Image: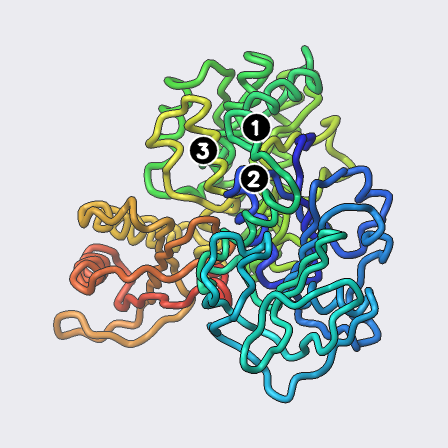
Amino acid sequence: MNQEEKILIIDFYGQYNQLIARRVRECNVYSEIVPFSTSIEKIKEKNPKGIIFTGGPASVFEENSPKCDPEIFNLGIPVLGICYGMQLMTHMLGGEVQKADKREYGVTSVKINNNSKLFNGFDNTNDCLMSHTDFVARLPEGFENIGSTGHCPNAAMQNTSKNFYGIQFHPEVNHTNKGTEIIRNFVYNVCGCTGNWKMSAFAEETVKALKEKIGDKKALCALSGGVDSSVAAALVNKAIGKNLTCIFVDHGLLRKNEAEEVEEIFTKNFDVNFVKVDAKERFLKKLEGVSDPERKRKIIGEEFIHVFEEEAKKIGTVDYLVQGTIYPDVIESGVGVGAKIKSHHNVGGLPEHVDFKEIVEPLRDLFKDEVRKVGIELGLPEFLVYRQPFPGPGLAIRVIGDITDDKLTILKDADAIFREEVANAGLHKDINQYFAVLTNIRSVGVMGDERTYDYTIALRAVTTSDFMTAGWSKIPFEVLEKVSSRIVNEVKHVNRVVYDITGKPPATIEWE
């Protein structure tokens, strides 16, 4: 990504590292997350306007605690350290970090020096989220205190001559009042950014880059009909026209009637070569008896590649495979950043036997809401851009345990009812993702005068802006009651419905 302005976020296994990136981008400045082990040469090559150190669970006293190259502090680039990032900055620049007598966690009132560029426009106090065991006991030479709490004498610090700043709290979370303003002040007032990161610029630059990269060669798009692959297809189509062929694989794991809807949308709204492959039996046979979610993902990913390879041979020479990989996929798969949460079938490169030259992932650096903005910018219909997110492996990871055609039918019917009633209640625009899960739990029930021993359906609905964190949606009880009643009465082999009220973290949005 060759943006003129870039803020580099150096990750020390921070829980909120993705949120920091989102907050910077909300300021119309491009941000990129890199691991703490990134070499100084690579950092220079990226030429950032500023650097942010994330928080992290480690202590600077630990022998193997994550540390960056100290040469960072000699680059003349502004640095903002958050929580562990502030402690690490202190430790590396000769200050003193100590263990706190009492861990400080939760929203705390911080006394701040609002003459600092970091707190421009703030009152003398600000409520901030604290989460730390260690604290800065003595500031490094050249630093001054610009924030404190009752338990933390150095809650914020600055060295204005070198543009180094540290804050012990987390500005990236909603719990911190005006947190995004703190990041904005750093990005604009300290780093001197002007804010040229916009979706229109992204679309324009990406189309230009794709034209240069692909030229008059041919590409295949791994089209699922979801938001990500649809926007990826539109970007590549704008760049290379009919040299793009969209392969839509109906693996039998789509939602009710979705295969037919996808075919209609793309044959009527896109000027591309559209090929539909009916591979339901093929996928189900490969998945037979498989319960482990990681194995499911890998099997589906590999089978997708095989299908595209076969279709490519029918078409002729195809150099590029287009995929709708987005930034959360990359981060959650642990590719270069943080710990692996789960694998994504469209992340990690091509197997050795695949005949394509390489994968093209035009959305790899974007979060979900940014992908939607690009879709609107490209003129895609709103109903397509805002359709419900759907994982690449489809219903395979919403059927807990082994997969059968009968189980898929149960889930498709239950999911369709849930989505229909959410829409009927006018909640479909307020809830960012909602779906049903067929658990592998069977329990005793009674219907009429007969005993039943059938499946439990779990309902999942979340509200989120970036899909990196999410809260469970407070759907009115009467709506949930109607959904439950309809499912147990209309869907065979279901006698119990439960509602998932877990946020992300600690859970992921999907169950598998």
Front position in the image: 61 or 451: 61
Q: Who's the residue at 40% across and 33% down the image? A: 385
Residue 333, percent from left and from top: 64, 52
The residue lying furthest to the bottom in this view is: 101
In the displayed structure, does residue 273 sit left or right of residue 336? left
Q: Secondary structure at mark 2?
A: loop
Disc 2 to disc 1, C-alpha distance: 10 Å
Q: Residues within 10 Å of mark 3 (few under 14, many from 20)?
A: some
Label 1 belongs to which residue? Answer: 202
Tell me the quadrant of the picture where the N terminus can be found.
top right
Say whether marks 2 and 1 touch (CB < 8 Å): yes
Label 2 belongs to which residue? Answer: 366
Residue 465, percent from left and from top: 43, 49
First-in-chain label (1 vs 3): 1
First-in-chain label (3 vs 2): 2
Regarding residue 331, the answer to whether it shows in the image is yes
First-in-chain label (2 vs 1): 1
In the displayed structure, does residue 366 sit left or right of residue 431? right
Disc 1 to disc 3, C-alpha distance: 10 Å
The residue lying furthest to the left in this view is: 448
Q: Residues within 10 Å of mark 2 (few under 14, many from 20)?
A: many
Q: Please determine whether, in this image, residue 139 is positioned above or below residue 414.
A: below
Label 3 belongs to which residue? Answer: 373
* Type of the residue with mark 2: Leu
Q: Please determine whether, in this image, residue 84 is positioned above or below residue 36.
A: below
Q: Who's the residue at 13% across and 70% down the image? A: 448
